[in-house]
Amino acid sequence: MMTPGSRNLITDVAGLKVGNAQNDHIKTGVTVLVGDRPFTAAVHVMGGAPGTRETDLLAPDKTVQQADAFVLAGGSAFGLDAASGVADALRAQGRGFAVGDQTVPIVPAAILFDLINGGDKEWTANPYNALGREALTGASDTFALGSHGAGTGALIADLKGGLGSASIRIGEHTVGALVAVNALGRVTVGDTRHFWAAPFEMEAEFGGHGTASSFDPQAIPPVKGGAQNTTIAIVATDAALTQAQATRMAIAAHDGMARAIYPSHTPMDGDLVFAAATGAVQVASEAESLLLGHAAALCLSRAIARGVHAATPAPHDAKPTYHMLHR
């Protein structure tokens, strides 16, 4: 039997913390996942328009197998500077990959496009380096969902997006997901209050409204225009995984994105899933490894719905929140 962790957050995976920072005037923000110690890191990209830093390093055949932190940020290409702020702060703590007498923190990052969302983007200096540092400084076992961190300025086809998270206990292992939802598509079925992820909901975590009674599978879904999209996520586990196994978990987690967003993985989305494995609990069998991927997909579906469900209104928003339309 699978149940949510005590917080129903990715930080139910022991040894991981999450920090958020945001600028509500700009309508953007940064979310950082950091480990108490380096974790095995992997990534899989299925969207056609990703914006990333150090993802090539996470291939199983590359030298570095672990990362110190992951960064999710708004700001399109500007947001990649958040990872520099995180790396600088980690270096000051003495953390990083040892190269001679130097340490180089490994901080892969992914960004979403939130430059056209009603916020004031006329900054004179890139704000993301400072936001990255702030998010790392505030990293904790608990953190806010919805219009916070990298989800601050996120939009989907018809609603505000947001930052979501969820967790599952499966056997001896814990699996969690963290996601910033800024999708081209929808997370609800037509104009109803029902989430596509409803079959996977646990304990009424996004309203308990159940599944839609019907929908037209041949209908062309409304979508957000242009290249203003991307859903970026992290799945994590306390299992001892190789980088190749963590990559498979990231691949499996994309199933959860496809179940929760309609459509997903489009040419105009940069859909990406990072994976983190802390290595605290050994994996007993190949079957157990398979179930970790399944649990990651379930967590990601739920986290996507939770992020949109938790979004809150703010002045000059470009789109309504879920609760403004579905009271």
Image: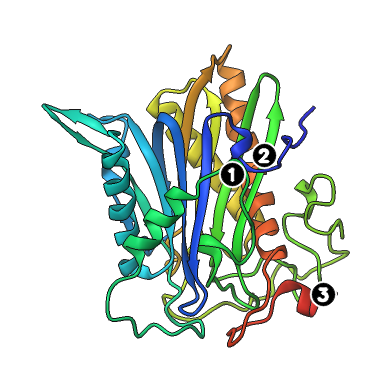
Q: Secondary structure beneath disc 1? A: strand
Of the numbered discs 3 and 1, the one sitting upstream in the chain is 1
Q: Mark 2 = which residue?
A: 167
Whichever of callouts 2 and 1 sits on the residue coming sooner in the sequence is: 2
Q: Secondary structure at mark 3?
A: loop
Residue type, mark 3 in image: His
**At 27% across and 33% down in the image, what residue appears?**
94
The quarter in which the N terminus is drawn is top right
Where residue 29 appears, as percent x and y from the top left, is: 47, 65
Q: Is residue 296 left or right of residue 51?
A: right
Q: CA distance from mark 3 to mark 2?
A: 25 Å
Which residue is labeled 3 in the image? Answer: 326
- Corner quadrant of residue 125: bottom left
x, y percent for residue 280? 52, 19
Residue type highlighted by circle 2: Ser
Residue at mark 1:
177
Label 3, label 1: how far apart the Cα atoms are? 25 Å
Q: Please tell me which of labels 3 and 2 falls first in the chain.
A: 2
The residue depicted at 54 percent of the width and 47 percent of the height is 254
Which residue is at a point 75% across and 68% down the rendered structure image? 189
**Of helix, strand and loop, which one carries label 2?**
strand
Near mark 1 (Cα within 10 A), the count class, few <14, some 14-19 or many ≥20, is: many
